[in-house]
């Protein structure tokens, strides 16, 4: 059985966020990682920019992260 802890899930998300940051930097867009993690409006703006990218890999990563941003929290 594969079980992933909350810390491991968060780390996986951080890896994806950092990957998006550097991929968008290559397109001339700056992403502030901490703000992306804490500000849903900022996160959506960054993801919209990524979704408009001509790079299919950037669009795929944005889609993967959007699923996490749009997911309702279990508070």
Image: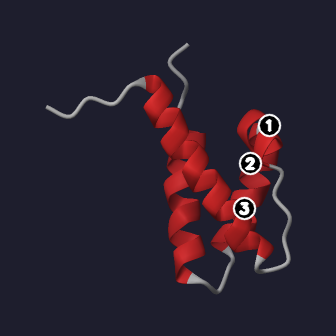
Q: Is mark 3 on a helix, strand or loop?
A: helix
Q: In the current view of this chain or complex, which residue is farthest to the bottom?
A: 54
Above or below: residue 44 compared with residue 56: above
Residue 64 is situated, as x and y percent measured from the top left of the image, at 49, 56
- Distance from disc 3 to disc 1, alpha carbons, whole Å, reads 15 Å
Binning the other alpha carbons within 10 Å of mark 1 as few (below 14), some (14 to 19) or many (20 upward) gives few
- Distance from disc 3 to disc 2, alpha carbons, whole Å, reads 11 Å
Tell me what residue is drawn at x 74 percent, y 71 percent: 24
Q: Inspect this view and state whether residue 71 appears.
A: no
Quarter of image, res 30: bottom right
On-image quarter of the N terminus: top left
Which of the marked residues, 3 or 2, is nearer the chain's N terminus?
Answer: 3
Tell me what residue is drawn at x 64 percent, y 52 percent: 17
Above or below: residue 7 compared with residue 68: above
Residue 22 is situated, as x and y percent measured from the top left of the image, at 71, 67
Is 52 placed left or right of 55 in the picture? right
Q: Which-is-in-front pick, marks 3 and 2?
A: 3
User: 60 and 1: which one is in front?
Assistant: 1
Above or below: residue 36 compared with residue 38: below
Q: Name the residue under label 1.
A: 39
* Contact (Cβ within 8 Å) of mark 2 with mark 1: yes
* Contact (Cβ within 8 Å) of mark 3 with mark 2: no
Above or below: residue 25 compared with residue 20: below
Q: Residue 43 carries which label?
A: 2
Is 30 placed left or right of 61 in the picture? right
Binning the other alpha carbons within 10 Å of mark 2 as few (below 14), some (14 to 19) or many (20 upward) gives many
Q: What element carries label 1?
A: loop
Q: Mark 3 points at which residue?
A: 21
């Amino acid at each position: 059985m594969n079980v992933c802890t909350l810390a491991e899930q968060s780390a996986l998300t951080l890896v994806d966020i950092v990957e998006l940051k550097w991929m968008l930097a290559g397109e001339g867009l700056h992403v502030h990682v901490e703000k992306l993690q804490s500000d849903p409006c900022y996160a959506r703006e960054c993801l919209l920019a990524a979704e408009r990218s001509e790079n299919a890999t950037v669009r795929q990563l944005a889609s993967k992260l959007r699923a996490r941003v749009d997911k309702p929290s279990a508070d």
